[in-house]
Image (tube, rainbow, N blue to C red):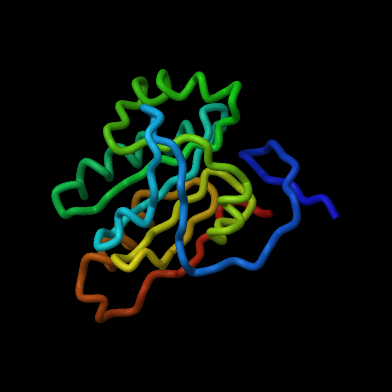
């Protein structure tokens, strides 16, 4: 059975959906074409946002992520923007990064298989919040909101004594 990747309101073909794992392994290329690996950030709290230049909700969400990264950078939180742009649309990434003043790492080459493997659902934007051991603790499918980012990051950097925020927030039906 052929499944689809939902991107904003656009459907893309997706091969079979596999079981999702809690481990977060991702190897892509940086915007300057260097190999980058999520596991190199173990020991840090990481927010990974999957997005595309042509995705309307992604374009609306990125300024929020830029603002939040500026706020959380001094607390050691790492933000990563993982683009799902294909070879053709990837040419637009540098202009997107410049226009949005993205100062955190931008990775290229993410795809539906990566989203599936990380249990991110079938939509972009999608945001994963990882603890220091590299486990995905929280997921937001669809555009995330300021309070969702802050609530999850504050819980991860805090004592974790209180109840955790919802592990999964869905803003898009899949």
Q: Quadrant of residue 173?
A: bottom right
Q: Quadrant of the N terminus?
A: bottom right
Badge count: 0
Residue nearer the viewer, 31 or 50: 31
**For the view shown, which residue lies furthest in the left direction?**
74
**For the view shown, which residue lies furthest in the front direction?**
35
Judge whether 154 appears above or below 110 on screen.
below
Residue nearer the viewer, 90 or 35: 35
Judge whether 31 appears above or below 40 on screen.
above
Position of residue 13 measured from the top left corner of the image (x, y, whole percent)? 75, 42
- Residue at image x 37%, y 26%? 97
- Residue at image x 28%, y 59%? 45
- Residue at image x 20%, y 75%? 159
Judge whether 142 appears above or below 161 on screen.
above
Residue nearer the viewer, 163 or 89: 89
Position of residue 155 measured from the top left corner of the image (x, y, whole percent)? 28, 68
Position of residue 98 measured from the top left corner of the image (x, y, whole percent)? 34, 21
Q: Quadrant of the C terminus?
A: bottom right
- Residue at image x 55%, y 56%? 120
Position of residue 101 measured from the top left corner of the image (x, y, whole percent)? 30, 26
Judge whether 128 appears above or below 5 on screen.
below
Residue nearer the viewer, 34 or 118: 34
């Amino acid at each position: 059975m052929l499944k689809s990747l939902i991107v904003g309101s656009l459907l893309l073909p997706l091969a079979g959906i596999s079981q999702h794992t809690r481990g977060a392994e991702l190897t892509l290329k940086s915007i300057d074409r260097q190999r980058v690996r999520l596991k190199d950030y173990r020991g840090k709290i990481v927010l990974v946002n999957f997005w595309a230049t042509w995705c309307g909700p992604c374009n609306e969400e990125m300024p929020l992520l830029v603002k939040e990264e500026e706020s959380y950078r001094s607390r050691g939180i790492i933000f990563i923007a993982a683009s799902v742009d294909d070879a053709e649309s990837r040419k637009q990434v540098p202009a997107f990064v410049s226009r949005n003043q993205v100062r955190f790492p931008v990775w290229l080459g993410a795809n539906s298989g990566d989203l599936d493997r990380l249990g991110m659902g079938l939509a972009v934007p999608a945001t994963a919040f990882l603890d220091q051991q590299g486990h995905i603790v929280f997921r937001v499918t669809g555009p995330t909101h300021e309070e969702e980012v802050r609530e999850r990051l504050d819980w991860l950097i805090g004592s974790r004594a209180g109840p955790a925020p919802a592990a999964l927030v869905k803003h898009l039906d899949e």
